[in-house]
């Protein structure tokens, strides 16, 4: 999108108590990430701060980041041959408005029927580590994706169209920023 940016890991606890829906959870986490960055940059007044979070869910259960290979295997077994949901929320802070705009996108992903051998091959890559639902659609797991309903960029972690619209609606100066 030609935007100047700096990446800053939020280092927030990505666990929420209570019975939040996948959408509510992702929005809460995205807002927490923005609030953390606002605290870190206090006094420096960055004009824009963006935070995003993605949650995978199936059968009403949220699948987080697996703690080990066995948990990753169990998640992939559960996902194979089925559709599951992916919710990504993006929160945007604009220093001029002093508010946070947060929106979420829900998409559906259908995995092909994976063999035990395919699952073990994927686990051997290590790509599942630190990934919600044990996979990264933008990586090797794309070999296993049979169908996508919704936004591919949201499934990968940032809904580009929605982010662009949020920036535009919040007064981002498109056409006045020089990209180097």
Image (cartoon, rainbow, N blue to C red):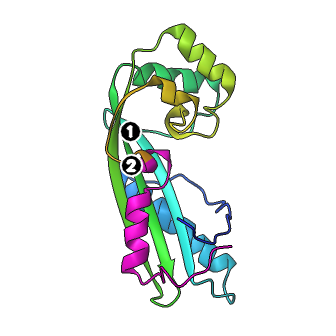
Task: From the top left corner, tell me how far across and down residue 110 is, in percent.
Answer: 35, 28
Between 97 and 72, the one lying in front of the other is 97
The quarter of the displayed image where residue 127 is located: top right
In the image, what residue occupies the spot 38% across and 49% down?
87
The quarter of the displayed image where residue 180 is located: bottom right
Quote the CA–CA distance across marks 2 and 1: 8 Å
Region rendered in magenta: 153-180
Give the labeled residue for mark 2.
87
Q: Helix, strand, or loop for circle 1?
A: strand
User: Which of disc 1 and disc 2 is earlier in sequence?
Assistant: 1
Give the labeled residue for mark 1.
57
Task: From the top left corner, tell me how far across and down residue 69 is, in percent.
Answer: 64, 24
In the image, what residue occupies the spot 68% across and 20% down?
124
Packing grade of label 2 (10 A; few <14, some 14-19, many >=20) is many
In the image, what residue occupies the spot 66% across and 60% down?
11
Q: Please say if the residues under marks 2 and 1 sit with CB atoms less than 8 Å apart.
A: yes
Observer-side mark, 2 or 1, equals 2
Q: Tell me, yes or no, if residue 19 can be seen here.
A: no
Q: Vertical placement of 114 versus 103: above or below?
A: above
């Amino acid at each position: 999108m030609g935007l100047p940016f700096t990446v800053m890991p939020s280092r927030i606890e990505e666990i929420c108590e209570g019975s939040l829906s996948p959408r509510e959870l992702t929005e809460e986490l995205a807002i927490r990430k923005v609030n953390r960055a606002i605290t870190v940059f206090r006094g420096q007044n960055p004009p824009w701060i963006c935070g995003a979070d993605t949650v995978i869910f199936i059968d009403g259960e949220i699948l987080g980041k697996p703690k080990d290979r066995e948990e990753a295997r169990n998640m992939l077994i559960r996902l194979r041959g089925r559709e599951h949901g992916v919710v990504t929320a993006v929160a945007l802070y604009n220093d001029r408005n002093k508010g946070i705009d947060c929106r979420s996108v829900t998409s559906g992903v259908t995995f092909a029927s994976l063999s035990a051998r395919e699952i073990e091959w994927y686990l051997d890559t290590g790509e599942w580590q630190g990934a919600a639902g044990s996979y990264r659609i933008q990586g090797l797991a794309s070999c296993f994706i049979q169908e996508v309903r919704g936004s591919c960029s949201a499934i990968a972690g940032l809904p580009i169209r929605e982010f662009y619209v949020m920036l535009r609606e919040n007064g981002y100066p498109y056409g006045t920023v020089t990209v180097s």
